[in-house]
Image (spheres, rainbow, N blue to C red):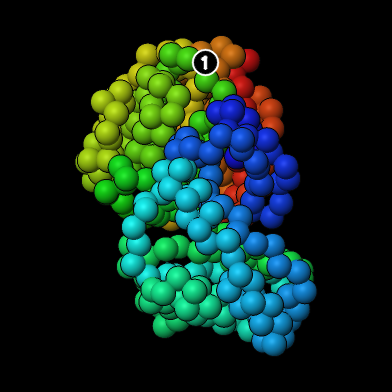
Amino acid sequence: MVADEIRERALGQVNQVGHREVWFDTATPGPAVLDLRTADDVLLIAAVVDGIGTTRADLRHLTRAARTLPLRGLLALRSRCGGPAEFDGVDVSASFLGRRAYTRYDIEDAVGEALSQVIGTPYRSRRGGQAPPPDSLPWRVTIAGERAVVSLRVGARPLHRRSYRTASRPGSLHPPLANALVRLAAPAPGARLLDPCCGTGTIPIEAALDRGLKCVGADHAPAAITAARTNDVTAHVTWLLADAARLPIDTESIDAVVGNPPWHRQVTPSGQLARDPARFWTELTRVLRPGGRAVLLQPDKDLIAPAGLLPVSCWPISLNGRHPVIVLARRP
């Protein structure tokens, strides 16, 4: 999805898609890279370091690489891409695959302390659980096999931290995932989209901001609708306090349904949906126009069978330690 969005926005040439990452080159770097909606973050590749084994002694390769990074060029490129020019301090976030004799904090310290010495600003360690201040220069290190990638975040904060998200509740959907669900529905320009269990409104807001759609968000919980209205910066979403099993929406008036129904996971169903879950599918089919598409995040693919919807595709994903599926279905 990220690779497709990069191509759609004409941001550059996609070179490879790997574990949780998409690499692309651009001949005209600029702030448009910060407009990506399906990506968790966008970073500038500073170095690729080979020979990173499983012992703490192997981290010396990272320290050596950090001391020789082309910092002036990286900082200039970051500024061209819309990143802040001023910073006070250095912070590093690291992750790795496989069993190793060191922790993420050992990786972060090996790179952060070296960068601090070269740049001449304090290193803000995450060891101990402390979050670095927002004005630090943010670096990222990932290790897979014996290869490490050192990169510099373009923005002041990760792309997934949307500025509109000022109100949150349990079960709030990750914004890039919400955006990807909307894109999988492939709504036409001007289409009408419904999220029948909208929570804090992430799906309708993403659809309105990114795709310019006419959106409806419904939820049975008054606190959820209040949070959604607080988050809404679009003025293009209609918010309804309504039961997903009895929607005040005209028959065959919706082009796409995109949602994250509360199937007794982080959020418990309420109202008629709790008493008769099958009513969800009946209502979904009723409001969808013929040929309309539904994209739903579900615990498993078998829930999509009722009410005459035709399954089209299913994608397993990893989300917060769980493994739900994205199901795409169509009304005949």
Rendered-image quadrant of the N terminus: top right
**Residue at screen point 61% across, 70% down:** 68
Q: Can residue 305 be seen at all in this image of the molecule?
A: no
Taking depth in this image into account, of 1 and 227 the one nearest to the observer is: 1
**Residue at screen point 30% across, 42% down:** 164
Q: Which residue is mark 1?
A: 188
User: Relative to 53, is 270 above or below?
Assistant: above
- Please, what is the three-letter code of the amino acid marked with disc 1? Ala
User: Relative to 204, is 126 above or below?
Assistant: below
Instruction: Label 1, secondary structure: give it.
Output: loop
Instruction: Name the spot of residue 204 as percent of width and height, x first.
Output: 39, 31
Rendered-image quadrant of the C terminus: top right
Instruction: Name the spot of residue 193 as percent of width and height, x first.
Output: 43, 23
Instruction: Name the spot of residue 19 as percent of width and height, x first.
Output: 69, 55
User: Relative to 166, is 71 above or below?
Assistant: below
Instruction: Name the spot of residue 70 as percent of width and height, x first.
Output: 58, 61
Q: Is residue 236 left or right of residue 137?
A: left
Which quadrant of the structure image shows residue 110? Answer: bottom right
**Residue at screen point 47% across, 43% down:** 81
